């Protein structure tokens, strides 16, 4: 029973729970047992609250028995990224300075998931303050890829992606600044969706005008991602840039129908590299995806937007964000922050008003060019990551196809250049290398066309089925 329950996706579990074919307590207990069985090798769920989860599951069962209307995520086991504040539950941000930190309030994402009936089993691992797309920190160590325990799970939502892949949870939240929802999903053969800025309100926020960092859903299927997005979306009066649009209303079992669409004539721009170095193994796995999209009825053309200036915009605003949020911590605790965090803060300290002004001008010009490009196509298809999952003992990727990568950000450009566009983007499983390492396809949609993009990803997923392949950590 435990193995069967953990194998179900979130939408299927939601139906079983609503029909009372299984109890929330049984579902939570099965997933807690799975964590205890496999997470010693993976190291994804680093803080656990199983007793509280079982208590909440019992209350959820009682409410359903009384005839109360179940929430959208009723009884579904989740875990929250260790960068999300959770009231009464340890939140370390991957930093030794906060190793015993217990917040007194929840973030909005955590509140909305709980209000929809989700049951948290704990916190998922992340790099220190989310710096980098490789999940390792001095508090908990490295999270390993369930498809190959010698490889990275990506980051910064690497714990979330690994936990989903190993069937420890069925839904997870994550943040995405430079690819932190997409890169780990790509590495772990799950689905990570970077929604449009403001689709999922961020509260509390260090900068209410920030459109580079977003929060969003991760799951094993596009339908499950849509389910969680429905629970997370919608305006909040405390968040000035939150979009006013309410999410579609549907029961879990109706979501697949909501996403189903006819792709005949949909113009898709295909770019195998976005003009960046890409490992041959990634190119080889992604090549068949072009024909898959054509087979779905899409009109696929070779094209890519002009992303010149995006690199400077990203690095400037990222550095500004780090010095604003963490600069005081570096001053008060010199030598106690990791090299990636310190490097970002130091770059922020070097910024001038002229740098910020130039980044603003470049950003505006980029937005204009991207809008013109997407007037002619609906979707851009390109790599999520330029590399396959790499050695877990590396700090970061230092070379791609013979081209040196001089900073720990360089190898993430295929994701973070897309972040700067402000467009919704998703990583969906696209296949495996001969060594069994997952590779994802990145699909980028028009401005604020989140739900239309999910429809394309859903169609691709349905005819490929790569996400159904379970990792070796579960099969021995």
Image: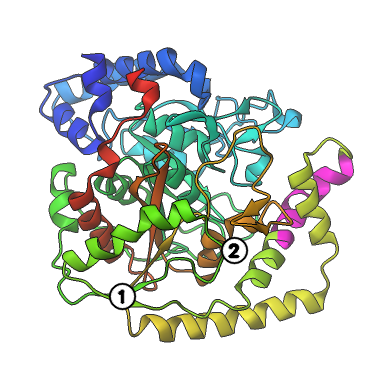
Front residue of 417 and 55:
417
Question: Is residue 182 shown left or right of residue 204?
Answer: left
Residue 217, percent from left and from top: 39, 47
Question: Is residue 94 shown left or right of residue 323?
Answer: left
Query: What secondary structure is marked by label 2?
Result: loop
Q: How many marks?
A: 2
Give the residue displayed 89% in from the left and 40% down from the top: 334
Residue 327, percent from left and from top: 80, 51
Say the numbered circle drawn on residue 210.
Answer: 2
- Does the image show residue 304? yes
**Image quadrant occupied by the C terminus:** top left
Give above or below for 332 relative to 32. below
Residue 21, percent from left and from top: 11, 21
Mark 2 crowdedness (10 Å alpha carbons): few <14, some 14-19, many ≥20: some
Label 1, on which residue? 378
Q: Earlier in the sequence, mark 2 or mark 1?
A: 2
Front residue of 13 and 340:
340
Q: Give the magenta range.
A: 319-332
Residue 407, percent from left and from top: 73, 55
Say the numbered circle drawn on residue 19.
Answer: none
């Amino acid at each position: 029973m435990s193995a069967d329950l953990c194998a179900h996706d979130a939408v299927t579990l939601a139906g079983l729970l609503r029909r009372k074919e299984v109890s929330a307590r049984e579902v939570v207990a099965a997933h807690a047992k799975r964590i205890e069985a496999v997470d010693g090798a993976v190291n994804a769920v680093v803080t656990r609250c199983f007793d509280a989860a079982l208590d909440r599951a019992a209350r959820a069962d009682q409410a359903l028995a009384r005839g109360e209307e179940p929430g959208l995520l009723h009884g579904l086991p989740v875990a929250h990224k260790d960068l999300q504040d959770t009231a009464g539950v340890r939140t370390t941000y991957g930093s030794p300075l906060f190793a015993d930190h217990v917040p007194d309030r929840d973030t909005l994402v955590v509140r909305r998931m709980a209000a929809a009936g989700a049951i948290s089993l704990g916190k998922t691992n992340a790099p220190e303050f989310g710096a980098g797309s490789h999940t390792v920190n001095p508090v908990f160590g490295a999270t390993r890829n369930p498809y190959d325990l010698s490889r990275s799970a990506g980051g910064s939502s690497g714990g979330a992606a690994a936990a989903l892949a190993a069937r420890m949870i069925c839904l997870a939240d994550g943040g995405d600044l430079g690819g932190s929802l997409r890169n780990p999903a790509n590495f772990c053969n799950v689905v990570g969706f970077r929604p449009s800025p403001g689709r999922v309100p961020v509260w509390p926020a260090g900068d209410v005008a920030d459109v580079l960092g977003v929060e969003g859903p991760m799951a094993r299927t596009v339908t499950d991602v849509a389910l969680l997005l429905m629970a997370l979306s919608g305006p909040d009066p405390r968040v000035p840039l939150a979009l006013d649009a309410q999410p579609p209303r549907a029961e879990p079992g109706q979501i697949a129908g909501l996403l189903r669409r006819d792709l005949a004539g949909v113009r898709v721009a295909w770019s195998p590299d976005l003009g960046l170095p890409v490992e041959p193994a990634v190119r080889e796995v992604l090549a068949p995806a072009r024909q898959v999209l054509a087979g779905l009825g899409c009109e696929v053309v070779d094209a890519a937007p002009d992303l010149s200036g995006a690199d400077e915009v990203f690095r400037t605003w990222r550095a500004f964000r780090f010095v604003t949020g963490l600069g005081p911590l570096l001053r008060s605790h010199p030598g106690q922050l990791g090299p990636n965090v310190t490097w970002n803060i130091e770059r922020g300290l070097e910024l001038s008003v002229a740098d910020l002004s130039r980044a603003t001008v470049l950003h505006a010009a980029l937005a204009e060019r991207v809008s013109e490009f997407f007037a002619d196509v609906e979707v851009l298809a390109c790599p999520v990551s330029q590399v396959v999952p790499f050695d877990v003992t590396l700090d970061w990727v230092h070379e791609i196809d013979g081209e040196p990568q001089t900073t720990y950000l360089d190898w993430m450009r295929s994701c973070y250049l897309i972040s700067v566009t402000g467009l919704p983007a998703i990583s969906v499983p696209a296949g495996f290398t001969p060594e069994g390492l997952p590779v994802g396809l990145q699909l980028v949609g028009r401005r604020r066309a989140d739900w239309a993009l999910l429809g394309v990803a859903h169609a691709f997923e349905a005819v490929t089925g790569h996400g159904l392949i379970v990792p070796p950590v579960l099969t021995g």
